[in-house]
Amino acid sequence: MTHDLVLTGGHVLDPASGLDRKTDVAFHQGRLAEIGDGLSGREVQDVSGALVMPGLIDLHTHVYWGGTSLSVAPEPYARRSAITTLVDTGSAGPGNFAGFKAHVVDRSQTRILVYLHISFAGIFAFSPTIMVGESQDLRLMAAREAVAVAREHPEDIIGIKVRVGKHTSGQNGIAPLELALEAADQCGLPVMAHIDEPSPTYEDVVNMLRPGDILTHCFRPFPNAPVHADGSVKEALLRGRERGVLFDIGHGMGAFSWDSARAMMAAGFPPDSISSDVHTLCIDGPAYDLVRTMNKLLALDMPLADVVSAVTSAPARALRRPDLGRLVLGGVGDASVIALTDEPIVLEDVRGETLTCPQRLTARGMVSGGQWVDAAA
C-alpha cells in the first residue's frame, strides 16, 4: 500500500505502546496507518538520526493571542517545539471564552484544549508594567458561569483553572481554590491549581486537591518550595501522590528551581508531566519552550523514556484523552520528531542558576493530522 506520508530512518520511541526501535511510520487519510520497515508513501520525510515520538502535549501554555496580554501565538510556538496539542490553562474565563474559541481555538491548525479559568475574565492583567492577580477580587470568581460554559463546550474544555498565592489571590488566600473545586465537581472535571508565594502554603493547596487534579509549578523555588531545607519532600506531597494528585512542572518565569528540582529527583519524586507554562514574559527565557524544559529534566538524569512519557501519555491521561499521547494504528495522525545529539547546552532556572547538559534536544518537525510540518526556530 502507498501511504500519504512516511517517516523513514527514525528511531520510534513510544513508552506507552512499548515501541523502542528504528523503523518507519506511515500516515494515511489523516490517521496513523502503519509502523514497520520498508514502507512507501507519496511523501517521504527522512528523519534519520532523530526520535519519532507520539505527538507532544504541552499541558500548560497561554495561547489566547490578541485576547490576553500574556498569551503567545499558538502556531509559531507549536512549530518551535513540534507540539501537536497545546493546553491553554486559564487565559480565558467564562466571560471571554467565546472569543478565544472563535478567534483562536477553532482557527488553529494545532489542537488546543482548554482549562477554563474560574475568574470571569481569565488572566486579564499580566504584563511587564501591569500585573493584577485576578483571584484578588472574589467578585470575579464566576463558579456558576464557569460550570455553564464548561458544560456547553465539552469538546474544548477539559478542566477548571485557578491561581492562588500572594501574587494572585492575595488576601483571599485559598478561597478561590475552594470555589474552583466546587465548580469542577459540578461539571465532573479536574482542577489545575497554580501556587506562587505564600499564603496559602504549598501544603494547604495540595491537601485540598482530589485524584486527577493537577498542582502545577511543582518544582518552584523557596518560598513555597516542595521540599524542606534538608531536601526532604514535604509530607503533603507524598500523601497527595498516594491519593492520585498529579504534579506538573509548569516552568514559566518563576516556577522552576534547580535546587528544588535536584532535591525532588534525588528523593525519587519526579514530575508526572513536563510543561512550559509559556507566555510573553518567559518565551525568550528562562522557560523558552517545551523541548528546552524537557532538556532540563534530561539534565537531571530523568530517563529519556520517562521524559517522553511526561510529554505524551502522562498528560493525555490527565486530560482524559486516551486517543492522544501514543502511537496507535488507526489513531490520530500525530507524531513529533525530536533530535537528541551529543552537543552541550547551558540551561537556566528562574533564579539565573545554570547547568550544562552534555546532550541537546532539538525539534525537527511534526506530523499533525497526517500532514508534515517543519519545525521553526
Image: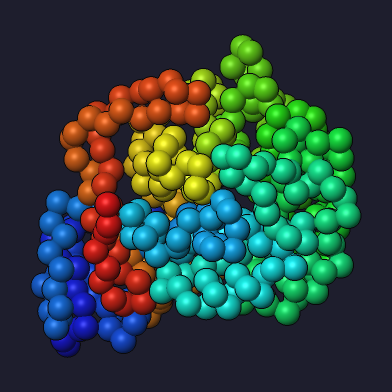
As drawn, the residue found furthest toward the front would be: 129
At a point 55% along the width and 24% down the height, the residue shown is: 260
- Can residue 268 be seen here? no
Report the front residue among 151 and 173: 173
| Image location of residue 11, percent across then percent down | 21, 55
Q: Quadrant of the N terminus?
A: bottom left
| Image location of residue 64, percent across then percent down | 56, 62
Q: In this image, 297 relative to 53: left or right?
A: right
Q: How is the image coloured?
A: rainbow
- Can residue 199 be seen here? yes
Residue 144's place in the image compared with 5, above or below, is above
Residue 35's place in the image compared with 91, above or below, is below
At a point 27% along the width and 31% down the height, the residue shown is: 345
At a point 83% along the width and 56% down the height, the residue shown is: 140
| Image location of residue 58, percent across then percent down | 48, 54
Report the front residue among 314 and 195: 195
Q: In this image, 169 relative to 329: left or right?
A: right
